[in-house]
Amino acid sequence: MRDSTRTDPLSPQAVASRSPVHVVAACYLGWMLDSFDFFIMVFVLNTVAKTFGVGVDATVGALTATLACRVIGAALFGRLADRFGRRPVMMINVLSYATLELLSGFAPSFTVFLILRALFGVAMGGEWGVGASLAMESIPGRWRGLVSGILQTGYPTGYLLASLLFAAEPWLGWRGMFIVGALPALLVLYIRRTVPESPDWAMRETQAREPVLSVVGRHKTLTLYAVLLLTAMLFFSHGSQDLYPSQLLSGFHHLPHRVIVWMMVSYNVGAIAGGLAIGSLSQRIGRRKALAGAALLALPAIPLWAFGDGILALAVGGFVLQFAVQGAWGVIPAFLNEISPEAIRATFPGVVYQLGNLLASPNANIQIWLSKLFGGDIRWSLAIVIATVSVLVAVLTAFARETRDVRMGMERRT
């Protein structure tokens, strides 16, 4: 006889109780797979150049096109999500970047390849803002710190997956790697079956919508502040990641490839741990303290990270520094959504994120220029940039208001 006191796992009530978990899983996977697809390009710059008979500087230009077009995607998909809902736009977004990744693997010429990578940048730029707003509006407030960390760890996890796929590049070829990169399209089936619309957006669905520029105009100071903070944060991450393997571990220390791969895995584990730990901590001590504390934690790690003598010292420094960097980033999804004007919550976080990305894009050039001032010693340029932005993030955070108790989404229905 069926026990009537037990809840049917397929009943509407049971499904609803699980929906926040599904939303978080879908948004985490969306950002992780987006990152996975992006880093495939990073690993195949040389082989793509050889296939099309162009210089590596040309394929680096394809990478730059991807990054530059992200701000377009943040504005486009964010606005669509504010107008038509987070859920359907996220599905379109995932299908877009997965399809463009697949088509990249079949590009007949470098010109076509370059266009496809620019369009991929548009799709990639849209995912973070839409996914973060959907997650933050769909969970209980007490979850926001932890979920913020979970969402942000999708980026280093995608990096790890792309690293593992790169091991199969001799058999797959670069085209095969891009074809594998189309697998995120399957995520749409999961979203369609299990993920409900944001309750926050659903409450405002029938309300008149104010134009984006009008909302931004009323929040000019907030917008400028958010762009400055995100610019510093993106110098923090790119300044600690982009040149470290090739210029320090390989170029300066001449470590073998297998050791560099092992160290990349090690510091990405540190990044994942930091995002989860500091994101969760921010729910207890507040966003400002957690963000500033994580940023300043990078300072004592710099001597080992940049000037460490030997593999163990560098590995420990890399782990701790990436724990700090991605720990600070673990607070950002929650913080940005909490400070966002609610009428453009899918647009605002993604656009300021990608504007910061655009402003931080000269990072590698700045670090190379600084190294020349020190006789080509890359250690000093890495250390100077990270020490500077670590303090800058902490100072900018001091001007923010505490947002941990902002009510949104599920909480606003109670």
Image (cartoon, rainbow, N blue to C red):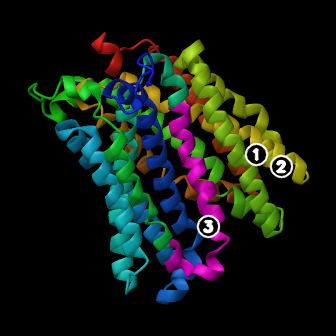
The answer to the question of whether label 1 and label 2 lie on touching residues, with beta carbons closer than 8 A, is yes
Distance of label 2 from label 3 (alpha carbons): 25 Å
Instruction: Give the residue at x 35% y 52%.
Output: 188
- Identify the amino acid type marked 3: Leu
Instruction: Give the residue at x 83% y 43%.
Output: 316
| Residue 238 visible at all | no
In this figure, which residue is indicated by the disc labeled 1? 318
Distance of label 1 from label 2 (alpha carbons): 6 Å
Where on the picture, by quarter, is residue 22? top left
Distance of label 3 from label 1 (alpha carbons): 23 Å
In this figure, which residue is indicated by the disc labeled 2? 314
Residue 271, percent from left and from top: 66, 41
Q: Nearer the viewer, residue 282 or 401?
A: 282
Vertical order, 94 against 154 (above or below)? below
What SS does tag 2 mark?
Answer: helix
What SS does tag 3 mark?
Answer: helix
In this figure, which residue is indicated by the disc labeled 3? 165
| Residue 317 visible at all | yes
What SS does tag 1 mark?
Answer: helix
